[in-house]
Amino acid sequence: MVVRSMRYRDVMRALLDHDCMHKSTKGSHEKWLCPCGSHIAIVPNHKVVSPGVVGDVIKKFACLPRGWLQ
């Protein structure tokens, strides 16, 4: 699967649409919890989220359906 960069607001909208919860913010980085509560991902609050970070969020939130982010 080819992962591409995304706008931050699109990543945030996808997280909220799949019932993920914003846990905390430190600087420009936000900690998000998956709906099951056992996975955590860090998402930078920048205009564009890099493909590496998008891929990391997809990998860490494996409990969500395939293709949920992209």
Image (cartoon, rainbow, N blue to C red):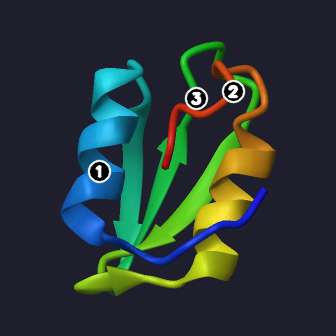
Q: Earlier in the sequence, mark 1 or mark 3?
A: 1
Q: Earlier in the sequence, mark 3 or mark 2?
A: 3
**Element at label 2:** loop
Q: Is residue 60 above or below residue 18?
A: below
Q: Is residue 27 above or below residue 18?
A: below
Q: Residues within 10 Å of mark 2 (few under 14, many from 20)?
A: few
**Residue type at tag 3:** Cys
Where on the picture, by quarter, is residue 40?
top right
**Residue type at tag 2:** Arg
Q: Look at 49% across and 49% down and name the residue there.
A: 70
2 or 1: mark nearer the eye: 2
Q: Earlier in the sequence, mark 2 or mark 1?
A: 1
Quick one: which residue is furthest to the front in this view? 2
Quadrant of the rendering where the N terminus is positioned: bottom right
Give the residue pinned by disc 2: 66
The one nearer the camera, 38 or 61, is 61
Q: Is residue 53 above or below residue 64?
A: below
Q: Look at 58% across and 29% down and name the residue there.
A: 34
Q: Residues within 10 Å of mark 3 (few under 14, many from 20)?
A: many
**Residue type at tag 1:** Met
Whole-percent x and y of residue 31? 49, 56
1 or 3: mark nearer the eye: 1
User: Mark 3 and mark 2: span between their CA atoms?
Assistant: 14 Å
Whole-percent x and y of residue 46? 29, 85
Report the disc number at residue 34. Answer: 3
Report the disc number at residue 12. Answer: 1
**Element at label 1:** helix
**Element at label 3:** loop
Q: Look at 23% across and 85% down and name the residue there.
A: 47
